[in-house]
Image: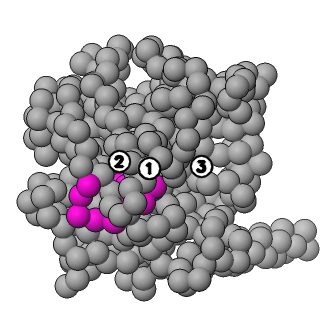
Amino acid sequence: MTLVRRLLILACAVQSVAMFSFATAAQQDIAKYADPNVQVAELMEGGGLVIVSNLNVLPNNDLLAIVFARQDHAANLGVKVAGKFAVIGRISKDNGQTWGAAFLVLDSPADGSRTAADPTTVVAGQKTIAIVPMCGPPQPPFEYGDIKIWQVASTDNGATWSKPSEIDIPRARPAVSGRSGVTLGDGTILVPYWWDFMFQIGSNTMAVIGDVPCASGTMISKDGGATWGLSTDVYGQWSARPKILRPADEPAIVALSDKEIFMVLRSARDDGLAEETWSHDGGRTWEQPQPGKLNGFNTPTGLWRMKNGWVARLWNNSKNALRFPLAISISKDNCRTWSSPRTVVGFPADSKWPVQASYPSVVEAADGALVAAWCHVTPDGKWIWASGRFTVDWALGK
């Protein structure tokens, strides 16, 4: 063996050890705060930015995780993008135990005219649709601009993606925020979305509780995503003193049948309970939301219907603004009652913002395990896009 070849082999070995050590350290930053029964992995490190991602099951049963990433964060994963932000993805072929190389799903325009934000996905037959809010420049009197919704699609399990097209809906600032859509038995696609109430009416004079006043609903397509309509709106409740419209945004949905759809909202009630609502006509109309039985102040939820009909719910089990602990519960009766929460990720009680385990997604993998993804911010300042894998039995306390 030549000296040059020996040196090359040694260099590769050192690089491999360094990458392994980095990956191990990153996973330890997650595992330190996760339950020992949760097998964790790092998907991306991103400093100073709340990481909003989505997790879904592809038609071939691989798992697809997508996230909006800053240009430098994407570059660290080997993805070159032209815009300031882009949506990138990673795929797991072993039920969430490991994740493949990152790839580009949708870039922002290089001229900065639009910026990709919180994405989501919906799987309809052999098609996977990624839906991405594209934010425009600030429009006074607001500090932010309008939002257009773009979509791209893959028919080969995430290997390639179509050119983007705009979803035309009569909302000035709509968004989807990582909550997965569902497809009903007749092919109807439902995607949970929300819209900024003050921006829509052109006034920012309304006082705020928890978050800006927003309304929610579902985007509906009956032609595979070619065209979209909207459901009735879901408004938050008014506080008594002062009279403020509470937020009702970043909704999560799960289809219990082709008619019965359950929704959990990001809400900001004084009692800390998460608000819930139901549709009895396939997501077209919604009841007035009511407080459920689980805590969840001003933070979104992940929902997933399992193959046996049970529903997994992943959320921040907190009555206040702290976005931890991250907890899992299971419903065996169509979201009427829930098992005792199990903590997936917890932090010391005295932890301060921005410490969090938030914006969760959860799916059931092909082997029956539950797999989650979330934004993980540690007390020592690590910002991580994290994933975890655990059994249903553990979630049920067995």
Quarter-of-image position of residue 186 = top left
Amino acid at dot 3:
Ala
Q: Which residues are magenta?
A: 291-304
Q: Residue at x 74, y 43 (%)?
A: 71
For mark 2, does the 10 Å Cα neighbourhood hold few (<14), some (14 to 19), or many (20 or more) residues?
Answer: many
Residue 102 - label:
3
Q: Is residue 310 above or below residue 130?
A: below
Q: Nearer the viewer, residue 201 or 26?
A: 201
Q: Residue 187: image x %, image y %? A: 19, 26
Spatial CA span between label 2 and label 3: 30 Å
Q: Residue 285: image x %, image y %? A: 20, 28
Residue that numbered label 1 is attached to? 241
Residue 35: tell me if it is visible. Answer: yes
For mark 3, does the 10 Å Cα neighbourhood hold few (<14), some (14 to 19), or many (20 or more) residues?
Answer: many
Residue at the front extreme?
241
Q: Is residue 274 magenta?
A: no
Left-right relation of 217 to 41: left
Residue that numbered label 2 is attached to? 265
Q: Earlier in the sequence, mark 3 or mark 1?
A: 3
Can you tell which of label 3 and label 1 is closer to the viewer?
1
Q: Nearer the viewer, residue 249 or 235?
A: 235
Secondary structure found at label 1: loop
Pointers 1 and 2 in contact (C-beta within 8 Å):
no
Q: Residue at x 58, y 20 (%)?
A: 202
Quarter-of-image position of residue 371 = bottom left
Spatial CA span between label 1 and label 2: 22 Å
Q: Which quarter of the rendered picture does the N terminus lie within?
A: bottom right
Can you tell which of label 2 and label 3 is closer to the viewer?
2
Quarter-of-image position of residue 326 = bottom left
